[in-house]
Image (cartoon, rainbow, N blue to C red):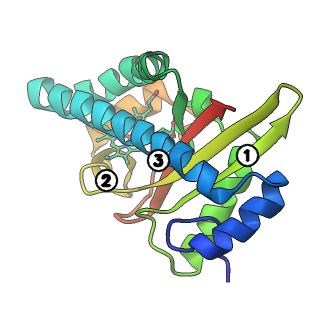
Amino acid sequence: MTHRISRTAPALALGLMLFATGGVQATDLEPLAATARDASDQLLELLKKTVTKAAKEKGPVYAIETCNTKALPLTKELSEKLGIDVGRTSHKLRQPKNAPDAWETKVLADFQARVAAGEKVKDMEFYEVVEGDDGQTFRYMKAIPLGGVCYNCHGDKIKPDLKAKLDELYPEDKARGFLPGDLRGAFTVKMKM
Ligand code: HEC
């Protein structure tokens, strides 16, 4: 089994959690996971609302510009408001500032393996307590599936005017060629314990 800690495998999760954290119970972590899940959902809604509004008002090229100028500041604002470090990352990046760290790279690889093994992207998540020089941090990631609307800007048939704007803003862009349902990336949350 390639299952890691997920809501669908609580017994396995408990075992792994005890192993991973040296005694912190999985049941202690579920409320933290719920908070992290909620922060991820809030970020999704915020960005979706912003892009949809921009596209409606001035079209998709403007929506890309809006994403470019607003996504990171809005992400930072939400983190400050919630007092939780929430963001987005991916194995195929568009915005270099969203680059995954070592832990996130490992989890993204694990998500890809789970997808390859047939698991659905929706509801896929992983969390654990990580020990660092600055103490314990609860770390959480939730997989992001590619939806129909997302396909316009991340798919394999991006319209020429959108493609030109993306080329201009993201010369290193790797976040193209996705199909609906694909693993696009993940929300990532850090909470000091
Ligand atoms: C109007 C075009 C557009 C649409 C539609 C769109 N995106 Fe994006 N996406 C972007 C741009 C531009 C960025 C880079 C934002 C930045 O610079 O902070 C981005 C960044 C991201 C990132 C951050 C990781 C990275 O590679 O930097 C994720 C995850 C993501 N998009 C997922 C989605 C999903 C899921 C949807 C559909 C719900 C979606 N996008 C719809 C244009 C779009």
Near mark 3 (Cα within 10 A), the count class, few <14, some 14-19 or many ≥20, is few
Ligand 1 lies under 8 Å from the Cβ of mark 2: yes
Residue situated in front as seen by the camera: 85 or 93: 85
Secondary structure of residue under mark 3: helix
Dot 1 or dot 2: first in sequence order is 1
Near mark 1 (Cα within 10 A), the count class, few <14, some 14-19 or many ≥20, is many
Amino acid beneath label 1: Val
Near mark 2 (Cα within 10 A), the count class, few <14, some 14-19 or many ≥20, is some
Residue 49 placement (x, y as % from top left): 22, 32
Amino acid beneath label 2: Tyr
What is the C-alpha distance between the residues marked 3 and 2?
29 Å
Residue 151: give its label: 2
Residue situated in front as seen by the camera: 63 or 23: 23
Name the residue that disc number 1 marks: 129
Q: For residue 54, which quarter of the picture?
A: top left
Dot 1 or dot 3: first in sequence order is 3
Secondary structure of residue under mark 1: strand
Residue situated in front as seen by the camera: 139 or 185: 139
